[in-house]
Image: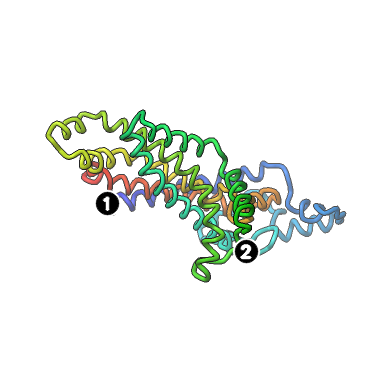
Amino acid sequence: MLAYLANRLLLMIPTLLGVAVLIFFMLRVVPGDIVEVKLRGDGGNPSQATVEAERKRLGLDKPIYAQFGDWMVGLAKLDFGKSMWTERPVTEEIGLRLELSLQVALMATVIAILISIPMGTLSALLQNTWIDYFIRIFTIAGLAMPSFWLGMLTIVSLLYFFNWLPPLTYTPIYKDPWNNLAQLFWPALAVGYRYSAIVARMMRSSIIEVLNEDYIRTARAKGVYERLVVVRHAMRNAMLPVITVIGLEFAFLIGGLVVTEQVFNLNGIGRLFVQAVGRNDFTLIQAMVMLTAVVFILSNLVVDLLYAVFDPRIRYR
């Protein structure tokens, strides 16, 4: 297992290098200039000399290969530079928002797992009953409704029925757990509902497929209790594709909740991503793409390790 883990971690290096090269050159192809946006965005009319001086200060006057060399050297040192817009360290800009986005993603994942696993299993075991139809309607509604729209309904309902709105200012959970959960529980619930709908559908399909396998019929023929057949044999094998979906959806939530963050007034990674793209802030965009790549790679690594937990055949190999 340790050799496998070390091999996977080493494979991260060429993947991240490829992402770093692609994002650097793709950003240089996109039209737009952050200097023009900064100096002339609000109707300003700076002289050409001022524009050139600002470009030189930001290092944009260097040849493309020199800028690429600076980016790769900084990446090797884990130094992502400073934001071209705020001139604050990129790690500081991201760190202020990563805690919020990560907590929402974790809470949404927990909510989705608690809802989807029992519902998907129950729907598979009680096929074509009214319970199955109800769960299928519930999950299809979750897939059909955007999470930001559900968030808007949540806010309107809280205001109309309880005359209460979630706090607008983010408070870390270690400082004030109540205010923190009062603000982040609702966006996590809105996102977790859609998340749970995807996982529940996958869980239902996987269990139905597994229940038709020969080893399930053999276990039943031997007189094994139905509960053991479902929990020990069916669910363990059905969980493999479900774990994959959970891992991919979790990685998507880091930086993928742009509109939901806007609805709940959350200053998270997704909102920062949009601001950075609108300002052509190259250094910030590059760092955030690298962060997203790292999250996806680590999520896939965790998923592969969980495969071994649920499937002994993988562990023995």
Residue 137: mark in rendering: none
Q: Which mark is residue 169?
A: 2
Can residue 67 be seen by looking at this rendering? no
Q: Secondary structure at mark 1?
A: loop
Residue 69 higher or lower than 193, as above or below: below
Say whether residue 236 is visible.
Answer: yes
Seen at 21% across and 45% down, the residue is 316
The image shows residue 306 at horizontal and vertical percentages of 32, 48
- Picture residue at 62% right of the left edge, 47% below the top: 152
Q: Position of residue 244 (x, y in %)?
A: 39, 42
> Is residue 269 shown left or right of residue 219?
right
200 left or right, relative to 166: left
- Front residue of this view, candidates 43 and 176: 176
Q: Is residue 163 above or below residue 199?
A: below
Circle nearer the N terminus (2, 1): 1
| Residue 65 x, y percent position in the rendering | 62, 49
Secondary structure of residue under mark 2: loop
Question: Disc 2 residue type?
Answer: Thr
| Residue at numbered disc 1 | 1
The Cα atoms of the two marked residues, 2 and 1, are separated by: 44 Å
Give the left or right position of residue 27, taking residue 105 as reference: right
* Residue toward you, 172 or 18: 172
**Residue type, label 1:** Met
- Tell me which corner region of the image, top left, top right, bottom left or bottom right, holds residue 87: bottom right
Residue at the spot 58% in from the left edge and 49% down from the top edge: 154
Which residue is rendered at x = 52% and y = 46% of the image? 19
Foreground mark, 2 or 1, reads 2
Mark 2 in CB contact with mark 1 (< 8 angstroms)? no
Q: Residue furthest front?
A: 161
Q: Label 1 neighbourhood size at 10 Å, few (<14), some (14-19), many (20+)?
A: few
